[in-house]
Amino acid sequence: MGELQGRVAVVTGAGRGIGREEALRLAGEGAAVLVNDLGGDFHGEGADRSPAQQVVDEIVAAGGRAVANYDDVSSWTGAEALVRQAVEELGGLHILVNNAGILRDAMSFKMTEADWDAVIAVHLKGHFAPAHFAGIYWRERAKAGQPVHGRIVNTTSDSGLFGNPGQANYAAAKAGIASMTLVLARELGRYGVTVNAVTPRARTRLTAGIGFGEAPAEGFDRLSPAHVAPVVAWLASDGAADVNGQIFIVNGTEIMVLGGYHVEGSVSGGEQPWTVAGLTAAKGALFAKRPAGTPELAVPGW
């Protein structure tokens, strides 16, 4: 018997890549899974129902329960329909994995308004909208005195945490998701819900063109998207019931937990207001705790 027996999970963007692996792993642990995927290309254009249905078929063939969903998670009505379908067709909702995403990379001075809006919509709104309606469902259950086993696992990115040229839209969305994870964790924790996020380093159709290369013909594949799924399944399980508001980097089988923003250095002017010249003079003290050899004005690697 798996760790998620009797639970119902929703995985967005589950037709391919990381989302597919997450859906299969959750099903393998005993969860019934709603497999959401609009089926567009990695730019967010077009639609194809076959990827989601293929994952459903694979889960069912292995003896699990699954249904397909083709709603647009960046739509308020689509997100609401997603949660409603899970409750009505699978009997409830316990786990929400927000994974759907697209890329429209361009340098900031070449990016179009459409490129910005599309990426922000799919990633940032596409995380918030399903979480909003899942939160309503769990809050109502909690207030009615019913047991709640709520788990939200969001998907961030190194680009959002550390910055990556050519991805202002994507990085802004992913950084927003990281911050939103902390807010949702604080808001929903009182109702029996945990909210965490994973930062995958994995080879998918979104990362294929940015140096992740091809899968090795044999041997260990550190960048396989399959490595992300066990972490997500763990965060959805009772074993991580006390883990809330955390962000994890998944680098193959290496798992790192981030410590968040911290004060790296400080200076005080006492009761005298700062001047520009005074701040220039104090710059060395302000950056004194930077690692040796780190240029003072370099972009920090948080």
Image: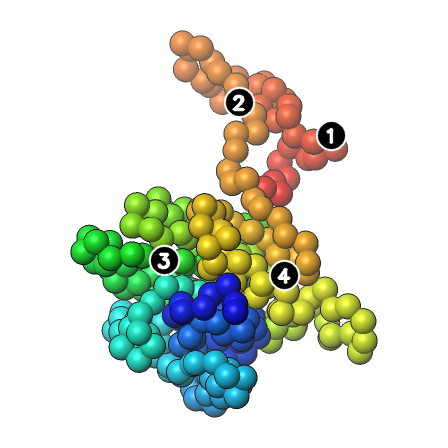
Q: Amino acid at mark 2?
A: Ser
Q: Which disc, if any, is residue 292? A: 1
How far apart, in angstroms, are the residues tagged by discs 2 and 3? 40 Å
Q: Earlier in the sequence, mark 1 or mark 3?
A: 3
Which of 228/147 is in front? 147
Position of 78 with respect to 200 (left or right) is left
Q: Secondary structure at mark 3?
A: strand
Image location of residue 46, percent across then percent down: 44, 86
Q: Which residue was labeled with disc 3?
A: 150
Q: For the residue labelled by badge 4, is the local secondary structure a helix, a strand or a loop? A: strand
Q: Are marks 4 and 3 in contact (CB under 8 Å)?
A: no
According to the image, label 2 marks what residue?
266
Where does the image place residue 157, in percent across and percent down from the top left? 54, 57
The residue depicted at 40 percent of the width and 58 percent of the height is 151
Q: CA distance from mark 1 to mark 2?
A: 17 Å
Q: Which residue is mark 4?
A: 201
Q: Earlier in the sequence, mark 4 or mark 3?
A: 3
Q: CA distance from mark 4 to mark 3?
A: 26 Å
Q: Callout 4, which amino acid? A: Arg
Q: Which of the two labelled residues, at mark 1 and mark 4, occupies the earlier sequence position?
A: 4
What amino acid type is highlighted by mark number 3?
Gly
